[in-house]
Amino acid sequence: MQNTNNYFISLILFCSQGVPKENLALVDIPVAFVGFLAPIIIRRTQQPLTWYAKSYVLCLIIALPIAAYVYFTPRILSATYYYPLLIVILSCGGFVGVLRYTAHIGFFVAISEPRIGATYITLLNTVSNVGFSVNSSIVLYSANWLPKRYAYVIAVIACTIFGVLWLGFSFRTLKRLQRLPTHEWYLKSETSADDAMMSIEQDENNHGELLVSNKEKEQDD
């Protein structure tokens, strides 16, 4: 969701700079294909927050050339290299965005208690989306006080600086959270995933034994 919002904002800005919508629709095809590769790369990782931190750095880096390309689009739109380079830039941005989103969803899946897994994941993802929406609203609202011609570029540079500062202050926290045992995230810290599965299996066995016992009593009667 977060990556989708960022991507569509970029497309809207390119449209505002004179790029035809039908051309952007064609550009979106290879970009979407590249995005499918991101989940495959980290499908077996045991360190999703580490991948998140790395992909976050890449997101900060790729935002700058995208902002520059948006700014210079009116001057280079007629150049033969414009659309091939646009595909490359947007593909890199889309890939990194999907990679970051997949990493943080992977972390939610890893720490979710088996008994309430889907509910837990939904709750964490909702909180994450709320935080993103608040930040996006603040940035878009602040853009009203920026010069119209440079609003996007200034916003990207400012957000990149804040992003670097945030990552610098929170990197140790991310590493600490990654090292926490999975059961520390559960509602009852003493309950582990193995214990939960054993409890489920034990309940099933007890239920089966009860059925057998009932059948034997019926036969005796």
Image: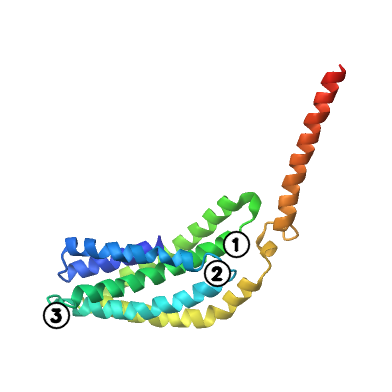
Instruction: Tell me where residue 194 appears, x and y as whole percent.
Output: 72, 56
Residue pointed to by mark 1: 110
8 lies left or right of 17 = right
Q: Amino acid at mark 1?
A: Ala
Tell me the distance, in whole angstroms, between the alpha carbons under discs 3 and 2. 41 Å
Asked whether residue 192 appears in the rendered view, the answer is yes
Tell me if mark 2 has few (under 14), some (14-19) or many (20+) residues whose alpha carbon lies within 10 angstroms of its own. many
Q: Is residue 61 above or below residue 119?
A: below
Which residue is identified by label 3?
75
Looking at the image, tell me whether mark 2 or mark 1 is earlier in sequence order: 2
Residue 19 placed where, x, y %?
17, 68
Where, by quadrant of the figure, is residue 78 drawn? bottom left
Which numbered disc, 3 or 2, marks the residue that appears first in the sequence? 2
Q: Is residue 135 visible?
A: no
Residue at 53% x, 63% y: name it.
Answer: 106
Q: Are marks 2 and 1 in contact (CB under 8 Å)?
A: yes
Amino acid tagged 2:
Pro
x and y percent of residue 67 in the render? 28, 78
Provide the secondary structure element on which disc 1 rests. Answer: helix
Disc count in the image?
3
Kind of residue indicated by mark 3: Arg
